[in-house]
Image (tube, rainbow, N blue to C red):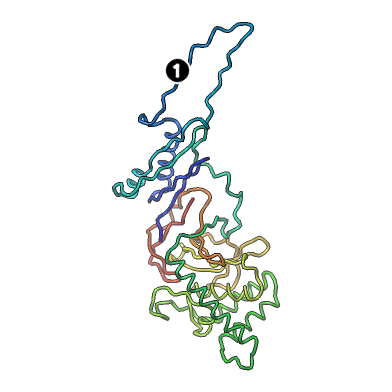
Amino acid sequence: MPADVATVRGVGMSVTLRSRGLKRAAGLALALAILAVLAVPAAGKPKRATRPAAPAASAATVTPIVPLTPAAQPARFFTINSVLAKLDGRTVAGPMRLASVTPGQEASDARDAMLPPASQEPFGLFAFRAPEGPLWVKQRKLAADIAAEADEINACREDASHCYAGPALRFIALTDHARKLTGRARLADVNRAINAAMTYTSDLAQHGVPDLWSAPLASLSSGQGDCEDYAIAKYVVLRAAGTPEDDLRVVLVRDRTVGQYHAVLAARQDGRWLVLDNRWPDLREDHEMKSFVPLFSLDSRGVSLFAAPYASELSDEADVTPATPHWGETGGGASTLPLLI
């Protein structure tokens, strides 16, 4: 998992720090930004022209003082290489990274005015396209597997008399039943049906690998799966039943109560995000899941990472030892900090 990230935003600047202490990193970056506004390095500071003495004012004339406009002043730059290196416990290396503020603008740790006042994503967090990495590789393979299964399902729908694929017929039955329902009733029905159709089994026990994402027909065929397999199957069934894709997210979280990574399906109904979990039959609203640390979401757009609108610290109860997650596998107390902006 990536290290914790803090971004200090100001009008005309954005400084991103990776560190073990978000509060310390944000404070150092802000201090540098303020210093950059107040003081120009001696080597690059332009000398002010000496202003001629103003003539004595008379009753007939007054000489106005015209201030130098910000547009006429050069941008001010400062390096954050040494700060990043010190926080990461390493020496300065690589190309110089500069942050800048333009004269007349203020450096601040206040929330960026360009961000919307509220998020429409689960858990009240903002979501951004995740960097390329292992999750994208898994997501693209999963999308290809789901597309291949869709051809099999459509073939069975067109000619059921010649369809001998049990999982496809079962998927069609689940979808047709869900399509007759609406709203929360549909979500609850699919949650119960998929939970009952599979027995929880770790990827290591079933496939011999730590983490494998399965498309729904594969899960229905084996009757086994771990948490992300349940969430994926619910996502695909609800989409086939007519639930808008923008109202569904497969969410990868850290559940601090049990000390492990977990996957659930979040579904939006009447403006509220409901959590469909393989561990219980009822639906719960996202704000009720106090033990969840949301990390990533998967949907038709691909992989997104969750980010809070402010850099903040976790509570002391949170475990903070970095680890590479295997979704649905016991993490042995290891955890990953949420990404914060």
Q: Residue at x 62, y 65 (%)?
A: 246
Q: Tell me: residue 202, above or below residue 47.
A: below
Q: Residue at x 45, y 45 (%)?
A: 15
Q: Position of residue 93 (x, y in %)?
A: 31, 48
Q: Hey, which quadrant is residue 64 in on the image?
A: top right
Q: Tell me: residue 23, above or below residue 105.
A: below
Q: Tell me: residue 68, above or below residue 75.
A: above
Residue where numbered disc 1 is placed? 50
Q: Residue at x 60, y 79 (%)?
A: 193
Identify the amino acid type marked 1: Thr
Q: Position of residue 126 (x, y in %)?
A: 55, 55
Q: Tell me: residue 268, above or below residue 74.
A: below
Describe the element under mark 1 as helix, strand or loop: loop
Q: Position of residue 96 (x, y in %)?
A: 36, 45
Image quadrant occupied by the N terminus: bottom left
Q: Residue at x 36, y 43 (%)?
A: 83
In this rendering, would 181 be left or right of 29? right
Q: Residues within 10 Å of mark 1 (few under 14, many from 20)?
A: few
In this rendering, would 189 be left or right of 207? right
